[in-house]
Image: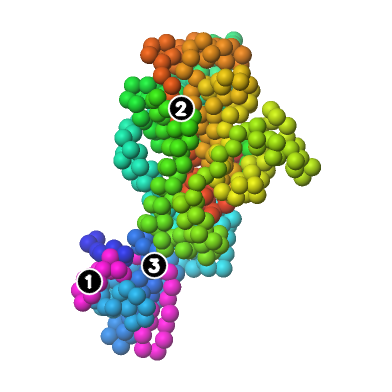
């Protein structure tokens, strides 16, 4: 159906006086003696279009006035009677689809909790439309940033035979019948589709390193899968992962890239999604815009793991999990550092090698690795990255210490054998970023159909 976007009708002063057709869903209906008003939304803009109906010249099908009904309206664009922008004087209203009263998106029941039970309809609400417009703008900005900075966009495979160790449990990929019986695990996998145990990738990093060690600067942006058994508000079984990898870069450049990327993304969102941010500021996180403006214009903090532990140890009596040098940081510690101590995003660097992955560059102290996590208020870890170990022997030692077989990593080791270079990168959880810029507190509310333990609606 040929029609004009509501956004254009609303905002384009040049449209005033023109006859147009618009399509959309009814969001409100108000009636009075002579005139009636329909507010329509078609997803193109946050604001709705007001359709003015002169009841003396147009009889209105009551079905066209029901919340959630879809209609097409032909009319003349006029300057809004009140406020800015334009509205539409209706000449003809056509019902596209009825919406009976059991439509679950009624004003009084719309808590995020309730809406999680109807993922296919929750996008009709203001909140979810705003989330997904911001999410789209963020994705576009990510590609733009990397394109403008000379990064190649790489697509890493999603099915893999190697577990990027330390990142969590892998989902298995199989075509075996559910009751297949074999004498041993080896027999079982030999018979499977790939002839070996295969799974869904937890990260594109290993392949990203392959690409960076030839193309220089690359990034991947795609789904990662983790059979996370923890039911937190920050973990999904399927999430989108932004993973740049840079040849000839050491840890400080990795940190610089992460900070620059985040600031660029935040500025893009502030520029492009003003209405959405204003909405979240009002209804979801008071002070959001100010927070984002501040973050975009101030320096992130940097703090070594060792310093972080000495700060945290002073508060051990208040933590559920007291820390000492060597402990992994829990969410409560991460939040304390970024929210209470630094009050801004903070890069924690140089973690004990025992709590980090085998591939991270070993520091000269023999105890720590050149890794960094970026912690942000409200969420905790949003980025995990490191310089990678470029020395073949050190990498082999780290793998032996973890009982990892070399055979599965022969290609990865070859990168260190043939023209090895210092390199590094990081992984940014895309949904966690969307949470951060919208103030939405549950990761299930920033993804279309969230997948988590016992939940695949
Ligand atoms: P966490 O400690 O929060 O589980 P992680 O250390 O497992 O994170 P990494 O393996 O470093 O995370 O992954 C890089 C980034 O990917 C994380 O900083 C986070 O933003 C994101 N991420 C990791 N796991 C998940 C998940 N299950 N759901 C959503 N995002 C995730
Ligand atoms: Mn994890």
Q: Nearer the viewer, residue 432 or 325?
A: 325
Q: Position of residue 413 (x, y in %)?
A: 46, 13
210 sits to left or right of 166 = left
Q: Earlier in the sequence, mark 2 or mark 1?
A: 1
Q: Position of residue 103 (x, y in %)?
A: 49, 63
Residue 35 in sight here: yes
Observer-side mark, 2 or 1, equals: 2
In space, the residues marked 2 and 3 are separated at their CA atoms by 46 Å
Residue in view at x 52 percent, y 56 percent: 291
In space, the residues marked 2 and 1 are separated at their CA atoms by 54 Å
Q: Which residues are magenta?
A: 8-37
Q: Nearer the viewer, residue 383 or 430?
A: 383
Residue neighbourhood size for the residue with mark 3, other residues' Cα within 10 Å, grouped as few (<14), some (14–19), many (≥20): some
Task: Give residue 15's mark.
Answer: 1
For residue 455, above or below residue 92: above
245 sits to left or right of 166 = left
What secondary structure is marked by label 2?
Answer: loop
Task: Give residue 250's mark.
Answer: 2
Q: Position of residue 352 (x, y in %)?
A: 63, 26
Residue neighbourhood size for the residue with mark 2, other residues' Cα within 10 Å, grouped as few (<14), some (14–19), many (≥20): some
Contact, mark 1 vs mark 3 (Cβ under 8 Å):
no
Residue neighbourhood size for the residue with mark 1, other residues' Cα within 10 Å, grouped as few (<14), some (14–19), many (≥20): some
Task: Give residue 47's mark.
Answer: 3
């Amino acid at each position: 159906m040929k029609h004009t976007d509501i956004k254009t009708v609303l905002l384009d002063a040049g449209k005033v006086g023109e006859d147009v057709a618009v399509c959309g869903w009814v969001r409100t209906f108000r009636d009075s003696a002579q005139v009636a008003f329909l507010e329509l939304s078609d997803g193109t803009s946050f604001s709705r279009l007001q359709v003015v109906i002169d009841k003396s010249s147009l009889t209105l099908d009551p079905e066209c006035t029901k919340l959630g009904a879809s209609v097409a309206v032909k009319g003349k664009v006029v300057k809004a009677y009140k406020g800015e922008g334009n509205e539409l004087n209706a000449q003809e209203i056509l019902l596209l689809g009825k919406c009976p009263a059991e439509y679950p998106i009624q004003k009084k029941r719309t808590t995020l909790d309730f809406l999680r039970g109807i993922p296919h309809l929750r996008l009709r609400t203001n909140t979810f439309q705003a989330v997904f417009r911001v999410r789209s703008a963020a994705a576009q900005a990510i590609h733009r940033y990397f394109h403008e900075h000379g990064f190649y966009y790489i697509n890493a495979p999603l099915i893999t035979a190697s577990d990027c160790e330390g990142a969590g449990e892998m989902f298995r990929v199989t075509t075996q019948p559910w009751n297949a019986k074999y004498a041993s695990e080896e027999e079982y996998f030999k018979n499977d589709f790939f002839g070996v145990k295969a799974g869904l990738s937890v990260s594109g990093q290993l392949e990203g390193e392959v690409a960076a060690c030839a193309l220089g600067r690359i990034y991947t942006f795609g789904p990662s899968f983790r059979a996370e058994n923890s039911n937190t508000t920050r973990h999904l079984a399927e999430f989108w992962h932004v993973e740049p990898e840079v040849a000839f870069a050491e840890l400080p450049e990795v940190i610089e890239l992460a900070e620059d990327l985040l600031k660029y993304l935040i500025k893009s969102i502030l520029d492009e999604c003003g209405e959405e941010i204003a909405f979240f500021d009002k209804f979801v996180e008071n002070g959001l815009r100010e927070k984002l403006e501040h973050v975009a214009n101030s320096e992130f903090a940097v703090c070594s793991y060792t310093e972080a532990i000495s700060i945290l140890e002073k508060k051990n009596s208040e933590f559920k999990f007291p820390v000492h040098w060597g402990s992994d940081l829990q969410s409560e510690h991460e939040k304390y550092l970024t929210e209470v101590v630094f009050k801004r995003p903070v890069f924690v660097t140089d973690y004990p090698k025992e709590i980090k992955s085998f591939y991270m560059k070993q520091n000269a102290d023999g105890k720590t690795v050149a890794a960094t996590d970026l912690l942000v208020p409200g969420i905790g870890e949003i980025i995990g990255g490191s310089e990678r170990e470029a020395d073949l022997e050190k990498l082999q030692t780290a793998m032996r210490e973890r009982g990892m077989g070399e055979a599965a990593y022969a290609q990865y080791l070859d990168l260190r054998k043939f023209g090895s270079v210092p390199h590094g990168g990081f992984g940014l959880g895309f949904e966690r970023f969307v949470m951060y810029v919208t103030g939405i507190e549950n990761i299930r509310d920033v993804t279309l159909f969230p997948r988590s333990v016992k939940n695949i609606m």
